[in-house]
Image (cartoon, rainbow, N blue to C red):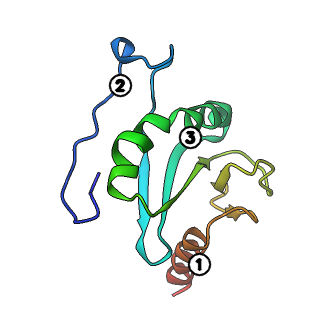
Amino acid sequence: FYTKDNSPLYLHKYTENKKINGKIPKIPDLIIAIDDKKEILNLEGKTYDKMEDGLRDIKLFDVVEKEYIKPNYSDYKIFRGVVLFGGKKNKITNKDVIFLLDSEGELITSEETPDVIKRAIKLIIDLNKK
């Protein structure tokens, strides 16, 4: 994790002996700071068949957000989401799923997908057309 002044900060792994309110806090797979929009994206990656695990995991990001993100990015709005790989769906039906890379390699977004992710996907698609 990098602070706002670009200093690295180690995120401590939570284990069985570090439960909070009976649950082990989760660390997002990817934390993206979008400085021009003052937004943080906390993303959890899962295979399509593990989507429910990802949706459950993003509910456990509170500790990381409170201990690491808010002290360093207090004026940023925080979003949580799941990114999925696999499956044969052509539509995202859960608002907490940011995007899906299906088993055919198709990148699928939804109305809820943040613009920065949509722009990144467009860049990837455009690069592959060349």
Residue 66 vertical position relative to residue 108 in the rendered view, above or below: above
- Where residue 85 appears, as percent x and y from the top left, is 60, 48
- Where residue 20 appears, as percent x and y from the top left, is 45, 20
Identify the mark at residue 122; answer none if there is no mark. 1
Tell me which residue sits at (52%, 45%) in the image.
45
Q: Earlier in the sequence, mark 3 or mark 1?
A: 3
Q: Marks 3/1: CA distance?
A: 22 Å
Q: Are marks 3 and 1 in contact (CB under 8 Å)?
A: no
Q: Marks 1/2: CA distance?
A: 36 Å
- Where residue 50 appears, as percent x and y from the top left, is 63, 33
Q: Residues within 10 Å of mark 1 (few under 14, many from 20)?
A: few
Tell me which residue sits at (42%, 51%) in the image.
30
List the residue tagged with mark 2. 14
Q: The residue under label 3 is which amino acid type?
A: Lys
Foreground of the two, 93 or 96? 96
Q: Marks 2/3: CA distance?
A: 19 Å
Q: Residues within 10 Å of mark 3 (few under 14, many from 20)?
A: some
Q: Earlier in the sequence, mark 1 or mark 2?
A: 2
Residue 57 vertical position relative to residue 108 in the rendered view, above or below: above
Q: Is residue 119 left or right of residue 2?
A: right
List the residue tagged with mark 3. 46
